Amino acid sequence: MSIDSLNWKILKLLQSHARLSNAEIGRRVGISSPAVSERIKKMEDLGVIQDYHTSVSPFEAGYQLKALITLRAFMGKLKPFLEKVKTYDEVVNCYRITGNENIVMEVVLKNQKHLEAFIDQLIVYGETKTQIVLSRVVKNNPIKPLK
Amino acid sequence: MSIDSLNWKILKLLQSHARLSNAEIGRRVGISSPAVSERIKKMEDLGVIQDYHTSVSPFEAGYQLKALITLRAFMGKLKPFLEKVKTYDEVVNCYRITGNENIVMEVVLKNQKHLEAFIDQLIVYGETKTQIVLSRVVKNNPIKPLK
DNA sequence: ACTGAAAAGTTCATTTC
DNA sequence: GAAATGAACTTTTCAGT
């Protein structure tokens, strides 16, 4: 499927402002709101649009620490871990990756004690390395059309 | 600021379904739509809600590869890189982190040739390590209230 | 992709608790 | 201070073109 330039205009708006009304989007891209609605629906159905997400400030929610934790799973422990990781409230995102480590997780934590307790839970699945997130330099940069 | 339980209910809905109408949220949490609207507005103003984001499938948009690239910046090159990184279309997210590497980026790329060309651009700023993302095990897991 | 009418949702002032 | 109500306005949905 190829995304036409009108759909790219719609996606550009939605990627940074998901709660814009169809009418407002229509005004900005120059079509009527039913047309916007139909295009968005089609993109949802085709899987071009995956989901609409609200980001909540971890800090405001009481999570003082953000970290990236990589895991190098022990033999036979990767599969059980892939199931277990879905149950951790601390894990916001988790990727399976190539290389020496198998897994990288983005986690939110109350404090250092919480971090320590969380890492302790992981130790049965593999070796971990932890990097504290100091700041977010680029945040959800919208995807653009290929040239 | 502490988030009350009604606001947590609203946030729970919004985190996974950012385009729900205020009226629909109100129905599900048991208050009127003006009350929902006011609560959301207040959370936006206080910075509890940071933004509303639509995720577009990189694959459907023509990006066949997703990778995590870490960078260990050369002496005096970190600051210029922090400015430069905001200009790369390939970089969806970028964090500054503690540890041996200073930076980790989530990037989307057309193909291996594109990856190679992108890494070539980074080489002036520091040493890179690239890990290809095989799959996303956990995706935007909503933040929950602290116990 | 547009139009037009009906249904649904939002906004704002006011009232209530 | 927080939420409900009701009127005016806006948006969405769904028909037909």
Image: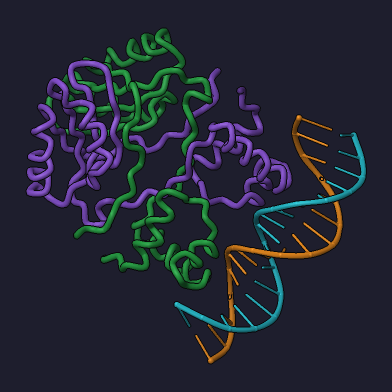
Chain colours: A green, B purple, C cyan, D orange
Q: Position of residue A141 (x, y in %)?
A: 33, 44
- The residue positioned 28% from the left and 34% from the top of the image is B94
B81 left or right, relative to A35: left
Relative placement, left or right, of B71 versus A14 is left
Residue B44, image quadrant? top right
The answer to which quarter of the image holds residue B141 is top left
Percent of width and height locating residue B11? 56, 36
Compared across the picture, whether B82 is left or right of A14 comes to left
From this view, report whether residue A126 is shown above or below residue B90. Answer: above
Q: Is residue A103 left or right of residue B22?
A: left
Residue occupying image coordinates x 64% and y 29%:
B5
Residue beneath the point at 23% across and 44% down: B88
Q: Quadrant of residue B95?
A: top left
Q: Nearer the viewer, residue A51 or B93?
A: B93
Q: Is residue C16 or residue D8 the one in the foreground?
A: D8
Image location of residue B110, percent across then percent down: 16, 52
Q: Is C13 in front, or is A50? A: C13
x 47%, y 50%: residue: A17
User: Quadrant of the image for the N terminus of chain A?
Assistant: bottom left
The quadrant of the rendering that contains the C terminus of chain A is bottom left
